[in-house]
Amino acid sequence: MTGIAMPAPDAAILARAPQIVAALRAALPADAVIWDPEETRAYECDALTAYRCPPLAVVLPRTTAEVAAAMRICHDLRVPVVPRGAGTSLAGGALPTADSVIIATLRLREVLKIDTQNRFIRVQTGVTNLSVSAELEAHGFFYAPDPSSQLACTIAGNIAMNSGGAHCLKYGVTTNNLMGATVVLPTGEVVELGGAEMGPMGLDLLGLICGSEGQLGIVTEATLRILPRPEGARPVLIGFDDPEVAGECVARIIRSGVLPVAIEYMDDVCLRAVESFARAGYPDCAAVLIVEVEGSPAEIDHQIARIREIAGALNPVEFRESRNADEAMAIWKGRKSAFGAMGRLGDYICLDGTVPVGQLPHTLKMIGELSRQHGLEVANVFHAGDGNMHPLILFDANKPGDLARAEAFGADILRLCVEVGGCLTGEHGVGIEKRDLMGSQYDAPDLDIQMAVKDVFDPRWLLNPAKVFPLEASRPWREGGAGR
């Protein structure tokens, strides 16, 4: 472990481990509870692999009723619960403690209803993001949010972190496409929020749940907005010899009123890795933008002409327009494989700050300066259209102190995002990674209000209790909750 601390496990809970496991096994199917230390090790971390701790037990339910039964037992026995989707969280959102029970949604895989007339699909939340659109393909529809991990990440995790993706510029992130949810509260009570109707009355509790990082409940079923597939789509690739100029191009496209479906950014460090890995045929330059537009052929031609005019004023080294499906696929190939390709360069941590689009040139310049100050290389690859940055800081995990240096560099980047008017996260969540930076964005009264909301849903503070909020700030709430 480096600089991120976790609370010491509760010795009293550890002493009651056999009783806790027995209660779970009595209430759930035989294959739904894992407690052998060798098997629980598979759940000791998520995609933030620098931090690990096997849980007391793991529950793998198949129904909402089974989730509710497990939650009820943990609540009655005062055992912390860590909700988990596919474990793709890059912020440590599913990191367990030794005295916690993981309740994972991976086996909740049923597609419950497809209604193209009313434009929604209802699924259990263990289905993967990509499989939702696969189910809709034959109907001529799709589900818009498309995070880079969409092949593996699940709808449960997407809701917990309010995930976005390349196409969020036009279609929004998860909260803009979530219509309803079945939620199991910490007591085991099951509630329905929202539904297939447009704009349900009353408090926006659905908006509160989306992005709450497993702090308020576990979502077991979701009603998702679906959209007809567009008539056509076409990406263009624009290369620049200056990363700040590429950032300025993004800002000018947004200001022009053109609304692409996606604007993606990759710098030269990322481009070198991508070319070595995917052979995508990208130009040798300082930064590349991938801009995709959609609509009728006439709409596409008009939008691309406008983008060409905007980019041309900034002297790009290349403006490549795809002419067919194969060329479009080639343009996207490198971006889709960017995170995997970066792994060939060594260890890295992936950040998730968000900045106003107009601040992209300045932010990129400052990240370069911070890179020189910390003596670590950084690659920038991100959803430029909404300013959701994903700097990848390269380091050597086998070199003592290197992870701590990378984390310090990352913290400076995230503080920079806040300073220019942005925020700490766009879609990865706070988890443990950004927990101790929350004071950079919120003052004490703001944090108290957020923790008071959690306290309403989870007065015993059993759900993901060491995440999101700085430990010192949450200590009175967590310690008070334990005795209720």
Image (cartoon, helix red, strand yellow):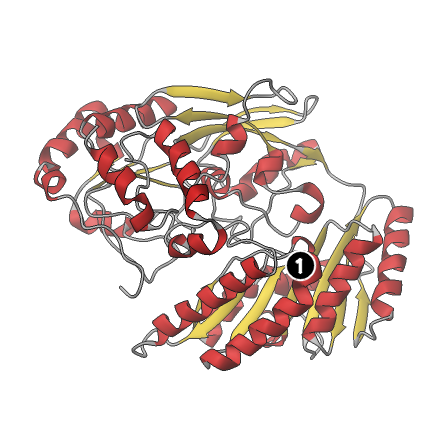
Residue 133 placement (x, y as % from top left): 61, 39
Residue 477 placement (x, y as % from top left): 29, 38
Q: What is the quadrant of residue 84 in the picture?
A: top left
**26 over 313 or under it: above or below:** above
Q: Quadrant of the C terminus?
A: top left
Q: What is the quadrant of residue 327 in the picture?
A: bottom right
**Residue at position x 64%, y 52% in the image:** 166
**Residue at position x 35%, y 20% in the image:** 189
Label 1: which secondary element: helix
Using a 10 Å C-alpha cutoff, classify the residue at mark 1 as few (fewer than 14 neighbours), some (14 to 19) or many (20 or more): many
Residue that label 1 marks: 384
Identify which residue, 269 or 37, lies in the foreground. 269
Q: Relative to residue 263, is residue 322 drawn left or right?
A: right
Identify which residue, 79 or 26, lies in the foreground. 79
**352 over 212 or under it: above or below:** below
**Residue at position x 62%, y 70% in the image:** 364
**Residue at position x 56%, y 44% in the image:** 130
Q: Relative to residue 75, is residue 291 drawn left or right?
A: right
